[in-house]
Image (cartoon, rainbow, N blue to C red):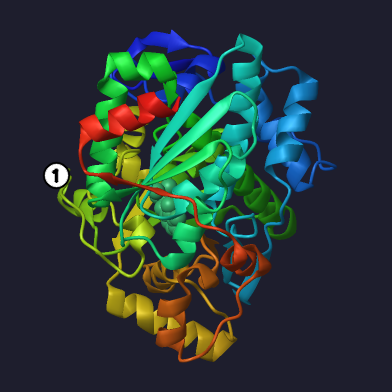
């Protein structure tokens, strides 16, 4: 197994280099060279989350990590449940939000920290993980890397544009985690990060590494729950299951595609987007035109140029007909999102966050009666104000969030100015 760049299949590297680099030197994204059929060799006795995770991840990790290390990485990364809730016998919700920051990004945050800190220790190197966040990524990365040896983390987030709870999830660690509040937008934060990576002096001095979903280390751990859910559904129902994924950068659904390629019984993959409808438009018109993003209720999916489409297009050789054999994609408005949240609450007593509701709307409104599972990407309490207002109810804060309210906020302000960021980072590390 090796990893290659979407822009040049001749550029190859091993898992350690792919994780540390984040992005290939030519600007492409890393893809695994093989998708071995793990499903056919899976014995019936393998059914726990841990054992399925081990089966599906081992082919990617075994070239570099020992069996012992793989066991440790899995134990450290996947220590929370993935309950599957039946709303009806044909409509299920897989809750991916029971980790420490209450969003599915904990799978990636924990796994990246467990793997990268081990790799850096073996290489006797220190690295600085630099990330821009619009909300959920920063918290999950901070939580994963807090007190991990050989790592510093710098998180850039836009002033006034993340929720109060999300800001607390970034700014209450201290230690090796540094939160920088940028006087600008999320796009400005992303541009600053890109400029830093392109700056040879800085990136070499600090050994910069990324933890955004361009890093293959974010996608591999997200394979685990697709393998787990599809395997269990097939054991009980003897049918493959269709899956809806609320999508922004399309990293989560790319992980589902990997699992399907490894033989697991997955039917259609359906990408549910909000008003940021670049991919649904591409599926219906055949023309792919990335644009700038628009703000919606499901703001973690406000992406105008989904980075992982480069991986999907590459895996299918840009053949739209072949892509449409496996995928569907539909866009959902904020009005539809709200009315879905209200209807699901009224009919089933189930509180879905806005991202999950986008997925549920698509599950209920596509042209098929096949049973379907919606991936629930965040806990509703993360979006407390919106959810309470839409459902006219009050939500309790889970302890993961309520304990943050008592902590001290540690952040530094910075202008939307690269030179200021650079001297701040050089002075710090
Ligand atoms: C990040 C995020 C998404 C989008 O995931 P992608 O992998 O970018 O498609 C959806 N929902 C929530 C709550 C998120 O935080």
Q: Tell me the quadrant of the picture where the C terminus can be found.
A: top left
Residue 310 position, x and y percent, is 30, 33
Q: In percent of the image, x 14 and y 44: which residue is there?
A: 287
62 w.r.t. 282: above or below = above
274 w.r.t. 206: above or below = below
Given residues 417 and 302, the one toward you in this image is 417
Q: In percent of the image, x 17 and y 43: which residue is there?
A: 288
Given residues 114 and 331, the one toward you in this image is 114
Residue 87 position, x and y percent, is 60, 77
- In the visual, does 422 lie left or right of 16? left
Q: Tell me the quadrant of the picture where the N terminus can be found.
A: top right
Mark 1 surroundings: few (<14), some (14-19) or many (≥20) residues within 10 A: few
- In the visual, does 54 lie left or right of 344? right
Q: In percent of the image, x 64 and y 55: which residue is there?
A: 99
Given residues 334 and 400, the one toward you in this image is 400
- In the visual, does 166 lie left or right of 9? right
Given residues 252 and 148, the one toward you in this image is 148
Mark 1 — residue? 287
- In the visual, does 47 lie left or right of 409? right
Residue 428 position, x and y percent, is 43, 29
Q: Is residue 263 visible?
A: no
Regarding mark 1 in the picture, which secondary structure is present there?
loop
Residue 219 position, x and y percent, is 50, 37
- Residue lying farthest to the right in this orientation: 45
Q: Is residue 328 visible?
A: yes
């Amino acid at each position: 197994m090796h990893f290659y760049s979407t822009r040049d299949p001749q550029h190859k590297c091993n898992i350690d280099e792919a994780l540390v680099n984040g992005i290939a030197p030519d600007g492409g994204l890393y893809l695994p060279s093989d998708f071995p059929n793990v499903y056919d060799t899976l014995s019936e006795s393998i059914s726990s989350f841990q054992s399925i995770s081990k089966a599906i991840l081992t082919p990617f990790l075994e070239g570099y990590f020992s069996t012992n290390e793989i066991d440790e990485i899995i134990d450290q990364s996947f220590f929370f449940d993935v309950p599957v809730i039946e709303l009806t016998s044909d409509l299920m919700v897989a809750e991916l939000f029971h980790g420490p920051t209450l969003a599915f990004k904990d799978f990636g945050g924990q796994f990246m920290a467990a793997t990268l800190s081990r790799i850096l220790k073996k290489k006797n190197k220190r690295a600085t993980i630099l990330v821009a966040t619009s909300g959920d990524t920063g918290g999950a990365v901070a939580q994963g890397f807090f007190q991990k040896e050989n790592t510093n983390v710098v998180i850039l987030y836009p002033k006034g544009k993340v929720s109060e709870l999300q800001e607390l999830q970034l700014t209450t660690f201290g230690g090796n985690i540094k939160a920088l509040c940028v006087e600008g937008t999320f796009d400005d934060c992303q541009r600053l990060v890109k400029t830093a990576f392109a700056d040879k002096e800085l990136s070499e001095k600090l050994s910069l590494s990324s933890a955004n979903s361009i890093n293959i280390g974010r996608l591999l751990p997200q394979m685990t729950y697709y393998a787990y859910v599809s395997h269990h559904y097939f054991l009980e129902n003897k049918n493959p299951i269709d899956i809806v994924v609320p999508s922004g950068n399309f990293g989560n659904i790319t992980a589902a595609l990997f699992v399907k390629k490894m033989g697991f019984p997955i039917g259609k993959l359906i990408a549910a987007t909000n008003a940021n409808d670049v991919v649904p438009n591409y599926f219906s018109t055949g023309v792919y035109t990335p644009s700038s993003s628009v703000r919606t209720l499901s703001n973690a999916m406000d992406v105008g140029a989904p980075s992982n489409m480069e991986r999907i297009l590459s895996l299918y050789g840009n053949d739209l007909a072949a892509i449409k054999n496996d995928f569907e994609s539909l866009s959902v408005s904020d009005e539809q999102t709200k009315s879905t949240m209200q209807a699901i609450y009224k009919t089933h007593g189930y509180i879905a966050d806005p991202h999950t509701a986008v997925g549920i709307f698509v599950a209920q409104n596509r042209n098929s009666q096949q049973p379907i599972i919606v991936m629930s990407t965040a806990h509703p309490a993360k979006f407390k104000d919106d959810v309470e207002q839409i459902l006219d109810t009050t939500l309790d804060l889970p302890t993961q969030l309520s304990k943050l309210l008592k902590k001290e906020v540690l952040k530094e302000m910075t202008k939307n100015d690269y030179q200021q960021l650079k001297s701040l980072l050089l002075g710090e590390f």
